[in-house]
Image (cartoon, grey):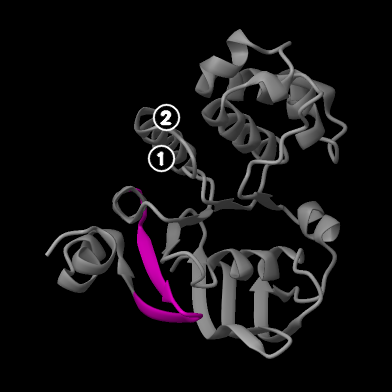
Amino acid sequence: MQQNVLKVSGLKIAYGGIQAVKGIDLEVNQGELVTLIGANGAGKTTTLKAITGTLPQCRVEGQIIYGGEPVQGMNSFKLVQRGLAMVPEGRGVFTRMSIHENLLMGAYLRDDKDGIAADVDKWFGIFPRLKERRDQLAGTLSGGEQQMLAMARALMCHPKLLLLDEPSMGLSPIMVEKIFEVVRTVSAQGVTILLVEQNAKLALQAAHRGYVMDSGLITMHGKGQDMLDDPKVRAAYLGEA
């Protein structure tokens, strides 16, 4: 039986009188790549922010269990200390720092210099574009390169759970394919991932399991391949009749 890393139960999130998330359940087991798909405004990013403790002032109900313990209301930096890392929508790299310096920032909680150096080499091996530009300022990179850097930086803290929020947003089709290739590579190395993504086809192709979110509710879930074959998913999210 797979160990449960994240379990969300009955999660409701309201901003004033607006109910953004209306009582959802989802879970991620160790070693899984789970995707949450849906249209803009469905509540996907709000859900991730609730999990990571980065929501603005709002009302949150329900339960978020991470690593076997309730974490709702916990400060985001404490969650990072517990191995929960997020690559936010928009990437959020340190633009006036070099690629190498950005990676070291991802390891700021660590003090094993040899291990940090080994991990820098490891991720440079998986992200060769970054290795070629290691001393270049992050702000001068393309969108796709910044996305790779944001992912590599998050992985430097050895996350037990990696949350990815719209990693393909704003990228060219070729770069989108590359980003998903990297996501699959990272997953194959045993990193547990919760992926929020609008590109439903690529997300479900990569995922072990998927959830569909619509207007603040989970409307469907199942194995990635089963959902790819589902006529409702194909019609609503893959543009196929």
Q: Is residue 67 visible?
A: no
In the rendered view, would you say 111 is above or below 127?
below
In the rendered view, would you say 148 is above or below 163?
above
Q: Residue at x 84, y 59 (%)?
A: 78
Residue at the spot of label 1: 184
Which x, y percent locates residue 42? 49, 72
Q: Nearer the viewer, residue 183 or 39?
A: 39
Residue at the spot of label 2: 175
In the rendered view, would you say 50 is above or below 32?
below
Residue extent of the magenta highlight: 206-220
Q: Nearer the viewer, residue 155 or 198?
A: 198
Q: Quadrant of the N terminus?
A: bottom left
Looking at the image, residue 59 sits to the left or right of residue 217; the answer is: right
State which quadrant residue 138 falls in. top right
Residue 80, which numbered label?
none
Residue 63 colored magenta? no
Residue 219 colored magenta? yes
Q: Quadrant of the C terminus?
A: bottom left
Which x, y percent locates residue 18? 64, 86
Q: Residue at x 37, y 51 (%)?
A: 199
Q: Extreme left residue here?
A: 241
Three-letter amino acid code at the position of disc 1: Arg
Q: Report crowding for label 2: few under 14, some 14 to 19, many 20 or more residues within 10 A (C-alpha).
A: some
Q: Nearer the viewer, residue 27 or 203?
A: 203
Which element carries disc 2, helix, strand or loop? helix
Q: Residue at x 85, y 41 (%)?
A: 109
Q: CA distance from mark 1 to mark 2?
A: 14 Å
Q: Nearer the viewer, residue 99 or 95?
A: 95
